[in-house]
Amino acid sequence: MNLLEIQARLRRLLDQHGAGLPSEQLRDMKELVAAGEPGIALENYCTQLFEYDVPVPTEAVVELEALGRAMGIHAKYWMSLRS
């Protein structure tokens, strides 16, 4: 999976499952993705979803895991979202 694909898939997740997060934090994560820092955006996104107790569908967690693994992100980020 290349950087452009990772960015596109993460942007899609942010658009689809970011409704329970503060808009300024969501905007910051989208800016990180656009700036070529999708790993930081994914870590922040997972952390914020957990902290704000936003329900995350299983298929979104699976996608976050796939993206995280592709970028070498520690599993603790998406594992906290599993119900």
Image (tube, rainbow, N blue to C red):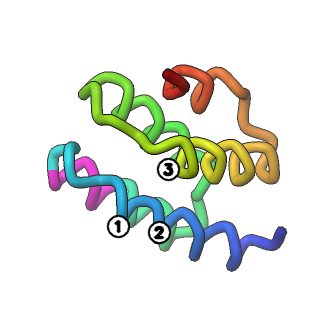
Who's the residue at 17% across and 53% down the image?
A: 24
Position of residue 17 in the picture relative to residue 33 (left or right): left
The residue carrying mark 3 is 41
Depth check, front residue: 5 or 58: 58
Q: Position of residue 48 (x, y in %)?
A: 34, 33
Q: Amino acid at mark 3?
A: Ala
The residue carrying mark 1 is 15
- The circle drawn on residue 11 is 2
Q: Dots 1 and 2: beta carbons under 8 Å?
A: yes
Sequence-first disc among 1 and 3:
1
- Image quarter for residue 56? top left
The range drawn in magenta is 23-28
Q: Dots 3 and 2: beta carbons under 8 Å?
A: no
- Residue 53, placed above or below residue 15: above
Q: Position of residue 12 (x, y in %)?
A: 47, 70
- Element on which disc 2 rests: helix
Position of residue 72 in the picture relative to residue 80 (left or right): right
Specify few, some or many for label 2: CA neighbours under 10 Å numbering under 14, 14-19, or 20 or more.
Answer: some
Q: Position of residue 77 (x, y in %)?
A: 58, 28
Residue 24 part of the magenta segment: yes
